[in-house]
Amino acid sequence: MVRRLAASLVHRGRSGEGAYADELVSLHSARHAVIAIEEARQPLRDCDGVYTMVGNGEVLNYREMATRLPSERRRRLPPGDLQVALELFAARGADGFEPLRGPFALAVWDGDELTLVRDRLGERPLYYYETPDLFVFASEVRCLESALRGRLALDEASVLSFVGLGRMTGDRTLYKEIKSVAPGEVLQIKGDRVRRRQLAPVPDLYDASRSPGDEAGVRRLIEQANHRMLVADCPVAVGFSGGVDSTVVLKAALEGADVAAAITLFSERGPGIDENLRRARAVAKVMGVDLIEVPFTIPSLDDTVALLDETLDMPAAEPLVLHNNALHTVARDYARVLLGGHGADEVFGGYDRYTALKDDANHAATSEWMSASPWERWRRTAGWKAFVAEWAGEAFASQAAFAYADSDHADFAHTDLSRADLTPTGSSSSDLTHTGSNHAGFAYADFKTTDALDRPFPYEFAENSDPVLFGQALDLFRLMTYDNFRATDENGIARGVEVRSPFFDLDLIAGVYALPVHRRIVPHTKKHLLQRTLHGTPMQDMFAARKVGFDDAFSYSDWMSENWPEFSSTITTGPLAELSVVRASLLQRLSELDWRLLWRLFSLTAWLKRRERF
């Protein structure tokens, strides 16, 4: 089993492998190294030789955190960012994880107890399988698939959630037996006891004394986030679209790092029709940067399926992975780290839907404004109950698997299970097998209700007082996580680059979200707090015009139509048709469905076919 786990993990790190074993555990790590590249080989040992750690990702504020270590540990501190995290844990226990910033998933073994932790945003994945005498964890579900052949059963309720919502809720995966560690969760396993705790919530991270709630304070937080983003002992590349987000990122990188490449994608149908390419060229010229221009066209059906199989752990809810794959494939020839502007719109309120919600003086109920939104993900979430009623297969109807609970939020289903009884979502480039512990395992209650909003999440308290903040937080902490975090991480690492954005910095998020809505979002100037960082530069007046959407030059609807016989038969003759997850009438009416739902059915079918090969 351990050999299969190790072999399945290789694609997540090509800088080196490491292993540790004793009579109770076997640890393995595949490392994608960007900090202390030669020195910080895993597994890591603390300076007293008591604790062993494997991990994925980075602690980007590790230099600051090293100054907080006890003097005897600081004096003997080996190189590396995760080494600082390990020494903090050795000195303070799980409290040592509280001040860490960055994308990470870590596992620490002390000879008696296993501790798992995941960053608060869930940028790095971490999954586990547990029975009374076996505990296994890994960075990806397919690693566990490889190790646990014959022990896993498809979770049909999660399959339906993916079709209708584009994600799984809570700690669920597409397998009943595999769960995920929640963002910001610490999971500690010792004998037959499993203890859980959450790191301090994101709203509590805002410190008004250090970053006053004004524009100057936000600017300092942006500078700090940019500084952290650049922490690497290797060159970086920048994904550059010519918008304000990636311009801020490229400007910071040019000022503080070794930039190996600035890369932009454009429509292969011709540079002349791609407005974003024209803008990217204009901004790059002002900045004195030579762009690497990458033509992109939507791959063939066969190539799309191969891409999904090779690089993704679970099905993709959005075709954005196809663009990202093209970008990541080029970036790996220049750098191990790729910087981008992901998350800026959610943090700084850049989307029209936020402005519209702010301008609505008489806010409707949450379900109503989400249903009326032009954004499909909000409508999809608000329409979950209706989707289930119309399209859930007979198996769910007969089992009353989706009976909706009454609640104050009547149009959304709420789980009647205590979150303490569940095991949430996760990330790590390491795995562990734990045997002989005889612990009882988690009680998995029947999936009788589903909360389409997947509460609780940071800032949900603002639902009535500041619906715009509620919507921004819902997007950032829930609706982005499945594809924007998970799929971007998986495809990037599979192609050999780690993807980072300064706009996922927790202190920046907490500082901006602490501002009242009229200071976060102002009329006629999108992301004004971010644009102000370019004042006094030649780029300050280059973003008045509305930016074209990244994929506006690519029509997935047309792509599906052009390939319709093969595309549709892939779905109707595939494994999904043999399950009782959706009604047969859904598959019979494919030509009537929205292209986004069609994509989810296609991507899910590709995943189910891959599963059959295991």
Image (cartoon, rainbow, N blue to C red):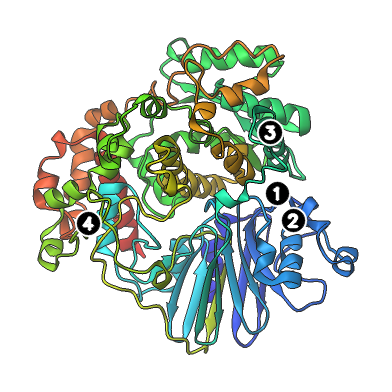
Residue at image coords 40%, 51%: 309
Expressed as whole percent of the image width and height from the top left, the position of residue 562 reads: 24, 28
Cα–Cα span, label 4 and label 3: 54 Å
Tell me, yes or no, whether the two marked residues, 1 and 2, touch with CB atoms within 8 Å: yes
Q: Earlier in the sequence, mark 2 or mark 4?
A: 2
Q: CA distance from mark 2 to mark 4?
A: 44 Å
Image position of 499 (left or right of 63): left
The CA span between labels 4 and 1 is 43 Å
Ranked by sequence position, the earlier of labels 3 and 1 is 1
**Between marks 3 and 1, how big is the CA–CA gap?**
20 Å
At mark 1, the secondary structure is loop
> Which of the marked residues, 4 or 1, is nearer the chain's N terminus?
1
Q: What residue appears at the point 64 percent right and 50 percent down from the top-left corner?
A: 102
* Vertical placement of residue 600 versus 522, above or below: below
- Look at the picture and state if 221 lies above or below 87: above
- Kindly identify the amino acid type of the residue bearing the numbered disc 3: Gly
Look at mark 4 in the image and give the residue it sits on. 575
Camera-side mark, 2 or 4 = 2
Give the structural element (helix, strand or loop) at label 3. Answer: helix
> What residue would you read off at disc 1?
60
Other residues around mark 3 within 10 Å, as few (<14) / some (14–19) / many (≥20) = some
Specify the amino acid type for callout 2.
Asp
Give the quarter of the image for residue 319.
top left
Q: According to the image, label 2 marks what residue?
A: 81
Secondary structure of the residue carrying numbered label 4: helix
Q: Residue at x 40, y 67 (%)?
A: 419
Q: Decide which of 582, 341 is in the foreground and name it.
A: 341
Q: CA distance from mark 3 to mark 2?
A: 27 Å
The answer to whether residue 316 is seen in the rendering is yes
Residue 17 appears anywhere in the view: no
